[in-house]
Amino acid sequence: MSAHGSPRPKAPLRVWIGTILIGLALLAAPFAFAYAGTAWVRIANFAVLYVMLALGLNIVVGFAGLLDLGYIAFYAVGAYVYALLASPQFGLHLPFWVILPIGAAVAALFGVILGAPTLKLRGDYLAIVTLGFGEIIRIFLNNLSRPVNITNGPQGITGIDPFSIGTFSFAKYETFLGLQFSGPIKYYYLLLALTLLVIVVNIRLQNSRIGRAWEAIREDETAARSMGIDTTHFKLLAFAMGASFGGLAGGMFSAIQSFISPESFVLVESIMVVSMVVLGGMGNIWGVIVGALLLSFVPEILRWTVTPVQEALFGRMLIEPEVIRMLLFGLALVLIMLFRPAGLLPSAVRKRELAASGEAPLVDARL
Amino acid sequence: MDTFLQQIVNGLTAGSVYAVVALGYTMVYGIIQLINFAHGEVVMIGAMVAFTVINALAGGGLPPLAVVLIGALSAIPVCILVGYSMERLAYRPLRRAPRLAPLITAIGVSIILQHLAMLVWSRNILAFPQIIQNTTFTFFGATISSVQIAIIGICVAMMAGLALLVYRTPLGTAMRATAQNPQVAGLMGIDVNRVIAATFVIGAGLGAVAGVLFGTYYGIAQYTMGSVLGLKAFSAAVLGGIGNIPGAMLGGLLLGLVEALGAGYIGDLSDLCSYGWIAGLMTERCADGGHFILFGSNYQDVFAFVVLILVLVFRPQGLLGERVGDRA
């Protein structure tokens, strides 16, 4: 706790230089990706989208310590809100800057709806209930095509509008200052800007009164309550805020894809986002970003290398890259928990916790 | 009345399978407070192994019952091996870790098992060969098939056997002692590690049989079948009171009934045309016996989750569980 109380030391020069270099690299990245092929720009976009999702989930899991295995439901809510309000489905075509906040708000509402009845639950019970909630949302999306067609069922919604302001559309190809901006590249910058915003919000939250309350609840809820923290209020807030980021990311997903169906919001996606948070280091914003980027790019690199390697070795493809990806992903979860339970870049608090595991409240000392 | 009785028969059949799977969750949870997420995959592997064996032997001249029996008997050791290695490699090293760690490992194990099964048995839905002559009996307008009777019978027998094991044998006593307090149990000379391993092995064995029964009943198996089945069985275990063995049996049967009756009646209940005043507002849709059904039986899978959430909110200790204080 005292770590946050002391004034922060001034950042040295090399931190500034590093930040500027990273910034330049991020700005130049889409063109490097475009050089490798437009597919890679899309992959980069999804990676940034996953960073946003993982940061949203990090509020719930990392800050407040509530394991949510149904997080993708909020992503789905955001995506469907956007799709329904900007597609031929209902003939509505509202502008994106109107819908995105609506999507985030609706997702936050769902977060509260999920949070309110489950507040009493802890740890693994909460995980299962949220998982059930995620499945319920998906089953509804799959079936709300009868008797009134709302979601168009398993076929999903097509022809979703891209983002546009006036005549400027994010889907069109454009040349500006001699540089060629394809649709995905424009989306990249938008995603980058929004993600930076989300990162700033996350950092500000972590060091705020709210963030400290979440940390206290995570460490020991009973103690937090007896210190006068309104645990109900703060847990609901964590659910709502995490969900709203999920909803925002969902809206972006909808527009970039221009097609969504319940297929995109299956359980394994929730688990994927949880893994990003866990792999990187729960509660550490930079760790979570690294986790999200790793889990987004490594599978793609696999996809592009596994097939040629297998063909060279065996003359044909024995195991699909998708399967190898999932196997490695499962293995990574197990190995990380066995050997680096706090993640690749653990947060300071977690490190402290694990060092003093004898007295940490999270440790079940019964065995 | 016909529907009602029929859905009760179907519900009891599915419910007894849920109950046997739920036992696997509840025994492990009772002893080490771990939700063994991968238990559903063990059940799936049981069904898959039995499928391969039955498929290979079908038409080989053996009596059908013997074929199914051999299928089940070969599924059991495979599942036991999976269950044991899972405990040994993924869970045992994490006994002292924060509680979320083994839960996340369990998710990892579940993903690994699912995709290994996919490599072995393909993505396709596999049709179980229907080799058993299925005779049906009718009573009071409901029909029950010989397979359904066999499933209910086998499940009840397994539950009785497990109850005997847990309450009447030295191993059972050791299991109950370990569940109450592992440290003291260890001091009393109980090999806690062996007891925990035995719990996983027994749960996996039961799961294997449940998988075979499930596959024979619905006639299909797929590498994804474990996750939903596992979730439902887990809901059943929570409904009965997790960690409580009779509770898992009761919870399984009840969940099966709720699901079957729910699926049987939700269409009628949510048909807006059957409510006079609403039907008055929608004369076009409801004319000539028309229907306006909000929720059909395709929402069947929702019931288990709704039951789970309701139980956890209103009676977190479950029907037969004891109220325990908050443990951080």
Image (tube, rainbow, N blue to C red):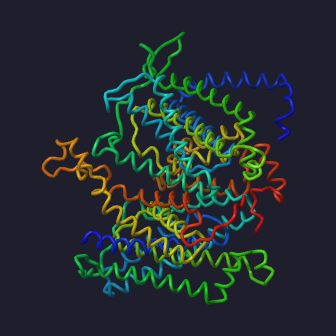
Foreground of the two, B277 or A31: B277
Foreground of the two, A7 or B217: A7
Q: Is residue B233 above or below residue A31?
A: below
Residue drawn at x 24%, y 48% is B292
Foreground of the two, B178 or A321: B178
Q: Which quadrant of the figure contains the C terminus of chain B?
A: bottom right
Q: Of all residues shown, which one is farthest toward the top?
A: A177
Foreground of the two, B169 or B224: B169
Q: Position of residue A352 (x, y in %)?
A: 82, 49
Q: Of all residues shown, which one is farthest toward the front?
A: B277
In the image: residue A15, left or right of residue A117: right
Residue drawn at x 40%, y 50% is A139
Q: Position of residue A299 (x, y in %)?
A: 56, 45
In the image: residue A156, left or right of residue B34: left
Number of marks drawn = 0
Q: Which quadrant of the figure contains the N terminus of chain B?
A: bottom left
In the image: residue A104, left or right of residue A8: left
Q: Is residue B323 above or below residue A64?
A: below
In the image: residue A129, left or right of residue A59: left
